[in-house]
């Protein structure tokens, strides 16, 4: 039997790809470099970039890739923080950002979008129709819906409105083997066969390529009130999610900042947040809804804050609210002034275990002599644990990696999850196996093998069966820097 080397196969594949798609394919080095990494900043070496202009081409690309064993990595705008969009094993990058159509169906309160539509653009357009698409990752001004679906993206408002998955009615796209499929319909219910729509959501571009998305929309919010409050200790602050739920209050935002984050903010931004209240944990809370609901919730929340906080401020006007928001935003950016690298984890734990987790992080800070701060979406137990260290300092980097491993073990022991919104990508492959028992892990692997028998779609992500991690372990763990 005649066999050809993988190099020859790659060349043949590329020739066929260019013959099929012509100018949509580029091998120009500068352009390849621009898609060789994402927010994790670990570069792969792609051999070709395909800037798709119509969905139908996806099938062509995937069929060729299967024939010649070429890895294919989908890309929205590359804001993934886990290396999810990095073409780690080379091959072809499928850029879907040009498929960015947005069609709003006012009558049915739906949106039909291309995967390249930017989330913030969709939100602006639906707002003009008096409608609302709630999922709001901090990256919404530049990230795409396709990327959000692949990662099941979250954000600040999930506590009341849920995550990306909660708004997806139907997905069209291509299986890794290149056949067209449509999962779900533009209906509010669908109980017909396996729910493969939900299997695709959060599968990080490893089980299929999304080319059209149908989303449900809700009515635009009438008004909102923002609160910033300081608390004596973490038990009271982190008790808020359950305490408020029990009182029937549904905040649209419930964000926590630990004492360390507040200290860092005051030190580096030079701002006293509340006169005479230093180094105390804080919550940023927002209520929204129709005026009558807001009035009732405001009364209840204000009474709770009077009783339980050290002090608090409220804002009903947009400009006033912005000043309170600055505290949350600058808390994160001030941490970046501490070291060359800021590693931001997005762990999620049961609501009643959050104090235990923060106490554990306080101990980690001491044990490893590291700057570590916690802030994030405590309303749904999704806390960002930030490690600051100097990447050039090998000894400090080692301590950061050890502390990170301990954190992940603790999260699993608290029955939490190592990622609540960013996904596994490359960055969390060393930890993901501990999250599952053998049967669970094998089931996931067999799904991957059934849908993608040649393993061409986004190889090396989630599963480390290709062992890419071994070669790049240190670099991957140590290069995570962003602001969330
Ligand atoms: C400053 C900053 C703040 C952030 N804040 C948040 C936050 O608050 N919440 C949050 O959840 N995330 C956040 N993120 C992470 C990131 O923005 C999200 O993961 C986002 O969903 C990625 O979208 P993207 O278009 O950039 O996708 P990419 O980074 O290009 O790709 C992400 C993954 O999706 C896959 N993919 C992309 N398009 C498709 C498609 N059409 N079909 C199949 N797979 C596809 C890729 O292969 C990859 O695995 C933040 C990132 C940054 C840089």
Image: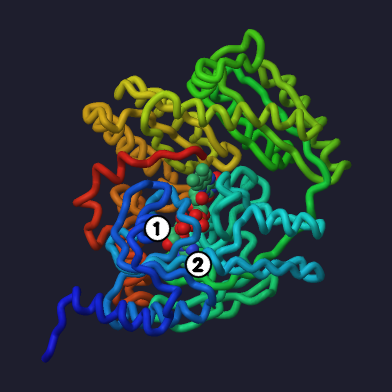
- Queried on whether the Cβ of the residue with tag 1 lies below 8 angstroms from ligand 1, the answer reads no
Q: Is residue 436 left or right of residue 161?
A: left
Which secondary structure lies at badge 1?
loop
Rendered residue at 69%/70% (across/down): 188
Is the Cβ of the residue at disc 1 closer than 8 Å to that at disc 2? no
Which secondary structure lies at badge 2?
loop
- The Cα–Cα distance between marks 1 and 2, rounded to whole angstroms, is 12 Å
Can residue 147 be seen here? The reply is yes
Q: Is residue 152 left or right of residue 275?
A: left
- Queried on whether the Cβ of the residue with tag 2 lies below 8 angstroms from ligand 1, the answer reads yes
Crowding around mark 1 (Cα neighbors within 10 Å: few <14, some 14 to 19, many 20+) is: many
Please say if 215 is above or below 139. below
Please say if 288 is above or below 162. above
Q: Quadrant of residue 409?
A: top left
Give 186 or 415, whichever is nearer the viewer. 186
Residue 333 location (% of width, % of height):
51, 30
Give 27 or 173, whichever is nearer the viewer. 27
Residue under circle 2? 96
Q: Which mark is residue 35?
A: 1
Rendered residue at 32%/80% (across/down): 66
Please say if 396 is above or below 290. above
Residue lying furthest bottom in this view? 1
Rendered residue at 22%/58% (across/down): 467
């Amino acid at each position: 039997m005649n066999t050809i080397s993988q190099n020859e196969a790659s060349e043949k594949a590329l020739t066929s790809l260019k013959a099929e798609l012509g100018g949509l394919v580029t091998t120009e080095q500068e352009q390849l470099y621009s898609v060789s990494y994402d927010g994790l900043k670990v570069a792969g070496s792609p051999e070709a970039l395909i800037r798709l202009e119509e969905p139908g081409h996806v099938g062509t690309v995937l069929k060729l890739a299967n024939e010649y064993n070429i890895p294919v990595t989908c890309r929205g705008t590359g804001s993934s923080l886990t290396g999810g969009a990095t073409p780690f094993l080379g091959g072809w990058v499928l850029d879907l950002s040009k498929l960015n159509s947005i069609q709003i169906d006012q009558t049915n309160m739906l949106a039909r979008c291309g995967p390249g539509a930017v989330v913030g653009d969709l939100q602006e357009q639906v707002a003009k129709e008096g409608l609302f698409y709630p999922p709001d990752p901090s990256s919404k001004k530049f990230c795409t819906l396709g990327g959000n679906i692949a990662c099941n993206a979250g954000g600040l408002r999930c506590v009341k409105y849920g995550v990306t998955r909660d708004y997806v009615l139907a997905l069209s796209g291509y299986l890794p083997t290149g056949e067209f499929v449509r999962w779900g319909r533009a209906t509010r219910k669908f109980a017909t066969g396996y729910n493969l729509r939900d299997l695709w959501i959060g599968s990080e571009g490893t089980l299929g390529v999304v080319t059209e998305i149908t989303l449900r929309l809700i009515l635009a919010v009438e008004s909102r009130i923002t609160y910033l409050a300081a608390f004596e200790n973490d038990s009271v602050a982190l008790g808020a999610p359950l305490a408020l739920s029990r009182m029937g209050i549904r905040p649209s935002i419930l964000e926590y900042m630990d004492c360390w984050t507040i200290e860092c903010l005051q030190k580096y931004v030079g701002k006293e947040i509340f006169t005479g209240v230093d180094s105390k944990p804080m919550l940023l809370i927002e209520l929204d809804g129709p005026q009558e609901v807001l009035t009732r919730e405001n009364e209840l929340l204000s009474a709770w804050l009077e009783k339980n906080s050290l002090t608090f401020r409220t804002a009903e006007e947009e400009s006033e609210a912005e000043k309170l928001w600055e505290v949350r935003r600058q808390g994160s950016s001030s941490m970046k002034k501490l070291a060359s690298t800021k590693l931001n984890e997005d762990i999620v734990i049961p609501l009643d275990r959050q104090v235990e987790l923060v106490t554990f992080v306080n101990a980690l800070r001491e044990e490893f002599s590291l700057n570590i701060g916690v802030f994030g979406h405590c309303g749904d137990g999704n806390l960002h644990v930030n490690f600051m260290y100097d990447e050039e300092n090998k000894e400090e980097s080692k301590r950061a990696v050890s502390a990170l491993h301990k954190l992940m073990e603790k999260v699993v022991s608290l029955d939490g999850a190592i990622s609540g919104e960013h996904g596994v990508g490359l960055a969390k492959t060393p930890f993901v196996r501990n999250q599952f028992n053998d049967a669970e892990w094998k089931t996931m692997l067999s799904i991957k093998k059934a849908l993608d028998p040649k393993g061409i779609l986004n190889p090396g992500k989630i599963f480390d069966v290709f062992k890419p991690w071994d070669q790049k372990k240190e670099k991957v763990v140590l290069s995570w820097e962003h602001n969330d």
